[in-house]
Amino acid sequence: MKFSSYLIPILIISLIAYSIYKKNNAYSSFVYGAKTSFDLVLTSFPYLVAIFIAVELFSVSGLSKLLSTALSPLFKILGIPLELSELILLKPFTGCGSLAVLENIFLNYGVDSYIARAGCAIVGSSEAIFYVTAVYFSQTKVKKFSYGIFVAIISSLLGVITSCLICKII
Amino acid sequence: MNFVWISFVMVGLGILLFKNVDIAFSTLLNGSEKAIALTLKLWAIYAVWLGILKIVEDTGLNQKIGKLLNPIINKLFGKTDPETHNQIAINITSNLLGMGNACTPSGIKAMKGLDKGSDIATSSMIMLMILNTSSLQILPTTVIGLRVAAGSVDPNNIILPTLIATTVSTLSGILLCKLFEKIKNKKLKRNKKLNNNQANLPPATTNVFK
């Protein structure tokens, strides 16, 4: 096993050790935190259903094939595999949705395939740009984002390209 | 998102009407079933990770990390009032640790604090937006969990690539922000100079041009 497999267990051991040193009740903290997962799951479930239905219709109707062929020249230049086009197009709108698409990629290509690993890196390295922007600015009067959206799209596109490149090497 | 969803569903169902009506409803149910399966997996991941993150919060570790971030926040956002500064620190720390439910409220508060009442986003507002859209999370725990659930041989081998990709997207976002900020400031200065020059022109000449 590689170093990365040790990372999470070691982090948890040191965290609990720190908790003992701080005289904090780690057990009750953990239980309380685990309880909050209930709310998170309840709020994300309806979105997952909606996205999964849309994505299923998208692929069964043959639209995703059409889209991939339309995008293939652009993606070839950027070095992005076509199988990831759905993920990359949905990602800016919904975080839940990209998890749904990622799960589909696992089923279709296998978890340890290059496509799936690149997809993982893409999901892990970006957020739902439009969703986050809408939520964060919701309490302000701002209506124009100036160069904001442009920078957000460019930087996450760079993240996508890097993900695809790095997963080929590592 | 409404538009995206509607167009996916309408066009998809529309095509199925002509292509293969019989599978239309089963496709919907299929999607819903997959959503339930994924929700169960996500629940397992969230329960463990939110439990651990609560220990982080209760030991005050996240506040310590927040303090370490002070110089970086000062550099990125310039002068901000202490309350906004604090919210930005909470937002960035919870982002780094992947505490999704903690970073949104603090992000909204910080954005409100940075708001100057204009309808155009200021450069520090855009900086906060970019930090949040480019993802700062160090450990992609949800993705690792999904890989474990899908039976991956080495679910953790995604950590390093994700970290590199996140670093590239975040750094490029910050650099682009600073670049655009400089361009914008230069434009503003030039406009001010032009305005000043026009103001200094004697009234007689302006009349000639009329």
Image (cartoon, coloured by chain):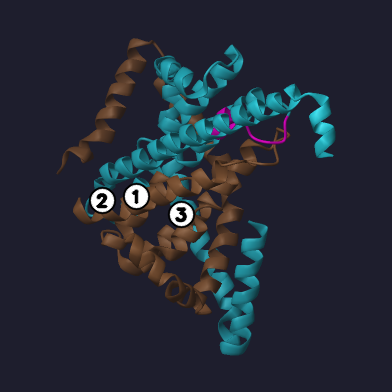
Chain colours: A brown, B cyan
Of B102 and B193, the residue lying toward us: B193
Labels 2 & 1 near each other (Cβ < 8 A): yes
B86 shown above or below A98:
above
Residue that appears at 41% across and 59% down: A103
B7 left or right of A113?
right
What's the amino acid at mark 2?
A: Ile
Q: On the same chain: label 1 and label 3?
A: yes
Residue placed under numbered mark 3 in the picture: A99
Magenta segment boundaries in residue numbering = B118-126
- Graded by Cα atoms within 10 Å as few (under 14), some (14 to 19) or many (20 or more), the crowding at tag 2 reads some
Q: Which residue is mark 2?
A: A166
Q: Amino acid at mark 1?
A: Ala
Report the residue at 22% width, 40% height from top: A5
Q: Which residue is mark 1?
A: A121
- Which element is circle 2 on? helix
Give me the C-alpha separation between circle 2 and circle 3.
Answer: 21 Å
Q: Is residue A80 visible?
A: no
